[in-house]
Image (cartoon, rainbow, N blue to C red):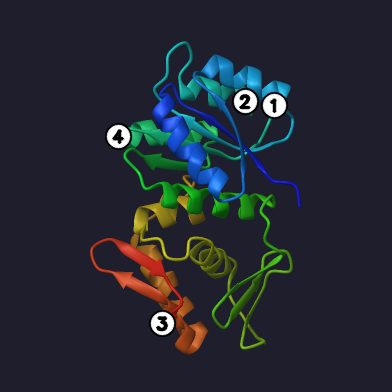
Amino acid sequence: MEKLKILVVDDEARMRKLVRDFLVRNDYTVVEAGDGEEALDVFYSDKDIALIILDVMMPKMDGYETLKRIRKDSKVPVIMLTAKGEEDDELRGFELGVDEYISKPFSPKILVARVEAILRRSGNGTADESIRAGRIELNKVAHIVKIDDKPIELSFKEFELLAYFIENSGIALSRERILNSVWNYDYFGDARTIDTHVKKLRSKMGDCGEYIHTIWGMGYKFEVEA
């Protein structure tokens, strides 16, 4: 199978190398750009880019403007790297169509996990239509979940929540991140809705509900016991 190509955009050569090395190690092809203007040139000259990792603060053209221009022509998945933690900055990015935010400094392993999860959701990953986790089999196309080969009935949001957990297996997820990723920013609700859905999901999953671990004061982590 042909390797998926990722465009890494950052004005720091050291950061580009760090990201590139981990992506290449995980069997991706990487192309690079040092600023927004160069990123647009690379993106429009190479039609095979599956995902963009885009820094916010760059000379010539920042990440927001770069994303804005790309979104006029493409829905390619975009992960933004930012040193900022202000909510307004993240809201601006999501309004422009960013798929994920990762704050610097970050773990390269976590970045790779995010890349893999987003590519699976966008249909560009190497995974089959069905994804497995322990005794669970989830088919995103058919919208079917089976435990020990027996179907279980989930609501739409319960299904989306379980899919998000499985795709981010082993990653500690805050309630806010889950809310933003599964319900999106058009949902003006309380993060406690996550707890309600998790409770129902665990109940329907039987003893497999133990795969969803509570991280007190933060959120949840989906992890299949070895």
Residue highlighted by disc 1: 73
Which residue is found at the position 62% from the left and 25% from the top?
Answer: 70
Residue highlighted by disc 2: 70
Expressed as whole percent of the image width and height from the top left, the position of residue 223 reads 43, 72
Q: Quadrant of residue 41?
A: top right
Secondary structure type for disc 2:
helix
Which disc number belongs to residue 210? 3
Q: Are marks 4 and 1 in contact (CB under 8 Å)?
A: no
Q: CA distance from mark 3 to mark 1?
A: 43 Å
Q: CA distance from mark 2 to mark 1?
A: 6 Å
Q: CA distance from mark 3 to mark 2?
A: 41 Å
Q: Are marks 2 and 1 in contact (CB under 8 Å)?
A: yes
Secondary structure type for disc 4:
loop
- Amino acid type of disc 2? Ile
Above or below 179: residue 153: below
- Which of the two discs, 3 and 1, labels the residue nearer the N terminus? 1
